[in-house]
Amino acid sequence: MTETQTATIPKKILFVNTRAPYGSSMARDALDALLAASAYEQDLSVLFLGEAVFQLLRNQNPEAIGMKNLAATLPVLPMYDIKQIFVQASALFTRGLSIDDLALPAKALSEDEIAALMGTQGAILSF
Amino acid sequence: MSLLHTVNKSAFNEDTLRNCLAICQAKHSVLLIEDGVYGALKSSPCRKQIEQLSAKGVSFFALAVDVDARGLNNMLVADVTLASDQDFVNLVVQNTATQSWY
């Protein structure tokens, strides 16, 4: 296989979010990196672990604390060809949340399923 | 002596609120700010402690702009009152000192 051929095989890249939305810039950084990466036609997935499930809540209004609304941007992911959106099921449960509370369609995964997902990736970026 | 405690970390992944509540007494006020407001959720690991301390005379507040930012309106325990930025200032002035938990 030549180098040119190798370069055309899409790489599987998983973006792992681990932080709540506005206490730090990590959630926004992850989203910016994800949208930037979407320009390179790779096979992208995004996973929300632990505190990061709070990023997906509806009705966020962060304008008064001088932040951009994450929940308003996240629903564009499918338009950027990022259709594999996952959340940690136990993290939702612990926080009294369900899939119906989220601002975009996501698939809830068990810890075993998360391990399997991570195992299939060419690269994992954690935020 | 009246004391104001501010807490800015989520109760779901940090011990900050738990450590604060452990030393809270009657007439103290606890103001949850930034990610600290997650500690006021009905699903909060500190819910029982908040309700018990509230019954003993500890006042609980969550900064309204931080609650609204995170989409948590109507998801908080009844013992926690929403506080405006002006309320925050009033709490600081009314109490002898402020202990910041972060």
Image (tube, rainbow, N blue to C red):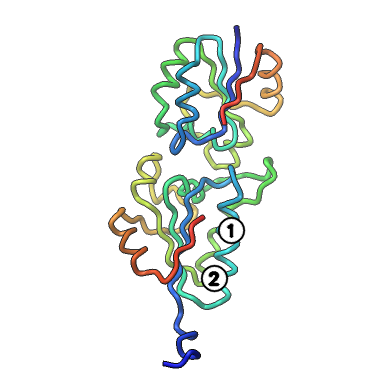
Assign a secondary structure to mark 1: helix
Residue B30 locus on image (x, y percent)? 55, 21
User: Extreme bottom residue here?
Assistant: A2
Residue at (40, 54) in percent of width and height: A87
Q: Is residue B45 above or below residue A60?
A: above
Identified by mark 1, the residue type is Thr
Residue A113, image quadrant: bottom left
User: In the image shown, does B16 or B4 lie closer to the viewer?
Assistant: B16
User: Extreme top residue here?
Assistant: B1
Residue at (65, 15) in percent of width and height: B97
Number of residues whose C-alpha sits closer than 10 Å to that of mark 1, classed few (under 14), some (14–19) or many (20 or more): few
Horizontal side, residue B47 vs residue A76: left or right: left
The numbered mark at residue A80 is 2
Identified by mark 2, the residue type is Tyr
Residue at (50, 72) in percent of width and height: A81
* Subunit ID for the residue under disc 2: A
Assign a secondary structure to mark 2: helix
Q: Is residue A28 above or below residue B70?
A: below
* Subunit ID for the residue under disc 1: A
The numbered mark at residue A8 is none
Residue B15 locus on image (x, y percent)? 45, 31
User: In the image shown, does B102 or A114 lie closer to the viewer?
Assistant: B102
Q: Is residue A24 above or below residue B31?
A: below
Q: Which residue is mark 1?
A: A73
Does label 1 or label 2 sit earlier along the sequence?
1
User: In the image shown, does B19 or A81 lie closer to the viewer?
Assistant: B19
Horizontal side, residue A38 vs residue B45: left or right: right
Q: Exactly how many numbered labels are in the figure?
A: 2
Quadrant of the rendering where the N terminus of chain B is positioned: top right
Residue B90 locus on image (x, y percent)? 70, 19
